[in-house]
Image (cartoon, rainbow, N blue to C red):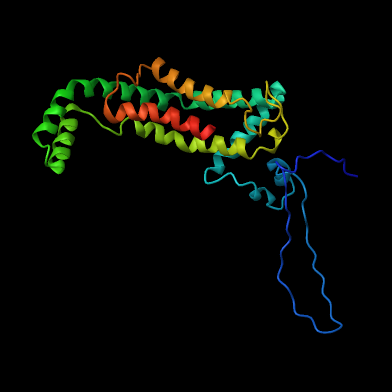
Amino acid sequence: GFKACPVNSKLFSPRPVLVFAGQALKPGESFQRKGQVFIGPQDFALLKSLHLQLESVVDFGMFGFISVYMLALLKWFYTWCHNWGLAILLLSVTVKLALWLPTHSSYKNMAQTQGKMKEIQPKLEAIKRKYVDDKQEQQKQTMALYQTAGINPMGGCLPMLLQMPVFFALYSTLSHSIELRGAPFLWLGDMTLKDPIYVLPLLMGVTMIVQQRVSGQSATQAAGQQKFMMWFFPLFLTFISF
């Protein structure tokens, strides 16, 4: 038999529906339909073990081919530490270590760009004053100055863009891990629910700013658009986390 499990209907309210095409019947006729139904959690390993391609219902998104390996690694960490919160931390650290080189390259490029931007700032101001009424020529001269100074405005962004599929896959992995439902960690009674005191979203934003400073970046010393982006990303991601 099945053991009843207390469920908060405000948080978890599954609505299974079975849909199939109707059939016109004459008086006295009948028909039968047969099928297989799985009623249970979207456990990727369990669904895959049935060999019915049911694992495809776990929607990891376009980067699912990465999420599958992340989920396997997350479960391996759990078998070692026996705590899903610690397993998530270990998985996150592993991902950061794997992406250390492109991240370091991006921050290094941004630091070099910041230094060059300071050097050419007077020339940029001169171009703005000279072509104040001709925005097209102002843009053309600015890009020419960037090229002469060896500045690539997108140089620091490209390594970060290469990391985006991995971060999307990590987010999708944690979003679709049924194992985390009801799993406690520190002050969290259930890691699939929000942090009731909002410490984790704030901590994430603060650590992003600290990471920038440790790597030699400083939003207070950056100029123009770069300064805006260095403050925007931590604040934006903190807002998303809330």
Q: Position of residue 2 (x, y in %)?
A: 88, 43
Q: Position of residue 177 (x, y in %)?
A: 66, 37
Q: Residue at x 44, y 29 (%)?
A: 235
As drawn, 2 above or below 231: below
Which quadrant of the figure has residue 26? bottom right
As drawn, which residue projects farthest toward the right? 1
Viewer-closest of 227 and 111: 227
Which quadrant of the figure has residue 78? top right
Q: Position of residue 39 (x, y in %)?
A: 78, 50
As drawn, 176 above or below 31: above
Q: Residue at x 71, y 64 (%)?
A: 19
Q: Residue at x 40, y 20 (%)?
A: 212
Q: Position of residue 32 (x, y in %)?
A: 82, 71
How many numbered marks have been drawn onto this rendered protein structure? 0
Viewer-closest of 52 and 151: 151
Left/right of residue 192 with respect to residue 242 in the rendered view: right
Left/right of residue 153 with respect to residue 134 in the rendered view: right
Which quadrant of the figure has residue 219? top left
User: Looking at the figure, which quarter contains the N terminus?
Assistant: top right
User: Looking at the figure, which quarter contains the C terminus?
Assistant: top right
Viewer-closest of 83 and 46: 83
As drawn, which residue projects farthest toward the bottom? 27
Q: Residue at x 70, y 30 (%)?
A: 190
Left/right of residue 238 with respect to residue 187 in the rendered view: left
